[in-house]
Image (cartoon, rainbow, N blue to C red):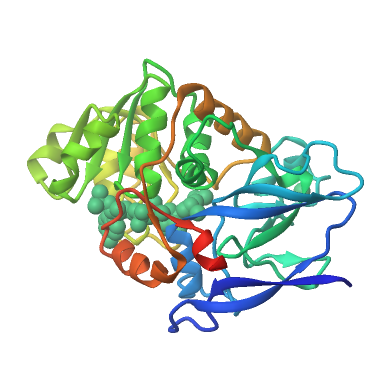
Amino acid sequence: MNVKNIKAYGTEAADAALGQLNINRRAVNTMDVEIDILFCGVCHSDLHFARNDWGMTQYPVVPGHEIVGRVIQVGGGVNKYKVGDLVAVGCLVDSCRTCKNCKNDLEQYCPEWVGTYGGYDKHLETNTHGGYSESIVVDEAFVLRVPENLDQAGIAPVLCAGITTWSPLRHWKVGKDSKVAVVGLGGLGHMAIKLADALGAHVTLFSRSTNKIKDAKALGADEVIISTDEAQMQKALGRFDLILDTVPYAHDLNPYVGTLNTNGTLVVVGYLGPLDPLLMTVPMIMGRKSVAGSLIGGIAETQELLDFCGKHNIISDVEVINIQDINKAYERMLKSDVHYRFVIDMKSLKK
Ligand code: NAP
Ligand code: ZN
Ligand code: ZN
């Protein structure tokens, strides 16, 4: 089949730095949209995937699933988009479209969903490659419209960090009477604070970092609890309706369960893997509390969020970098030194 060879940034091995490589994109099919990538956010999942933290990576990997760009070509059957439109692609580029989840706008839970990177491109018969690249070709059903009033770098993180926190906020019906807490102030955490605040909730941040208190309040948090301070944790017992836990590594969930109200839910969106230490059931039984998980969001819900951000002028707080600085950005991410999302200016790849 016809392919287009383009420049990208990625890695060939878990212990290798990211560097420039070339990849193929499929030629534009009838329902496809070709997008010139302007900005791409840097998610902690990119780092997990590049370094094979989840044990399922096939190389080479080109990460990036917070993509904003302009349409440069459309297939003959495309009617949602035209050349010049400002569009976005998040974590999903395809699904089966027929299962119950797909029919209910929950494509992220389709057993056949195709990730923007590390998925399987049935047209090219190779792995999909993400947004650390010059351009991408995606079926129009998985392309989102970006409100033109928003900063193009600032809106990119909404495609993953935003939707991953928005989806549970909406599912658990957060509104002005809700008491929401967020664990970890990084990419997901800062979007969770902004979005819960915009929905009218009372928002608390749990952080290990005492140097993030001022920032958290500026982002919309009503209060900050330092999670390593026993006395502060003790005072927080029984207070929250919903907790969004964004921490990327194994950590003790039990202290956070204790801070849930009766009927409260702790939603894990960060760490994938077995819990260590184990979860104690008694506090859950004694308060009808739940511990749940949540994965990104469907296409319709992501469009809902982009439109909400357009209306309320919400964007991510970003540090724009050149692609050549990606390895340094990963090192800073590992030290929780992100304020609060790196976004790559993809012009730097085209130079
Ligand atoms: P990030 O920007 O690196 O932020 C993570 C934050 O967690 C840090 O800023 C830090 O906040 C806290 N933290 C880091 N290491 C910790 C540790 N060992 N113990 C306790 N707290 C720690 O990461 P992100 O991009 O927001 O991603 C967060 C996680 O969500 C990643 O694992 C990513 O793969 C996952 N993710 C899941 C989904 C989904 O659909 N469920 C979607 C996207 C990403 P403080 O300094 O405030 O403590
Ligand atoms: Zn992500
Ligand atoms: Zn499906």
* Residue occupying image coordinates x 36% and y 15%: 177
* Residue occupying image coordinates x 43% and y 36%: 315
Q: Position of residue 265 (x, y in %)?
A: 40, 35
Position of 235 compared to 277: left or right?
A: left
Position of 66 compared to 248: left or right?
A: right
Give the answer, above or below, for where 281 lies relative to 60: above
Q: Is residue 185 visible?
A: yes
Position of 147 compared to 83: left or right?
A: left
Q: Quadrant of residue 175?
A: top left
Q: Position of residue 251 (x, y in %)?
A: 30, 58
**What residue occupies the far left of the structure in this picture?**
231
Can you say which quadrant of the picture contains the N terminus? bottom right
Count of picture labels: 0
* Residue occupying image coordinates x 68% and y 75%: 23
Q: Position of residue 81 (x, y in %)?
A: 77, 39
Q: Position of residue 238 (x, y in %)?
A: 25, 29
Give the answer, above or below, for where 294 lies relative to 148: below
Q: Is residue 288 visible?
A: no
* Residue occupying image coordinates x 55% and y 48%: 295
Q: Quadrant of residue 100?
A: top right
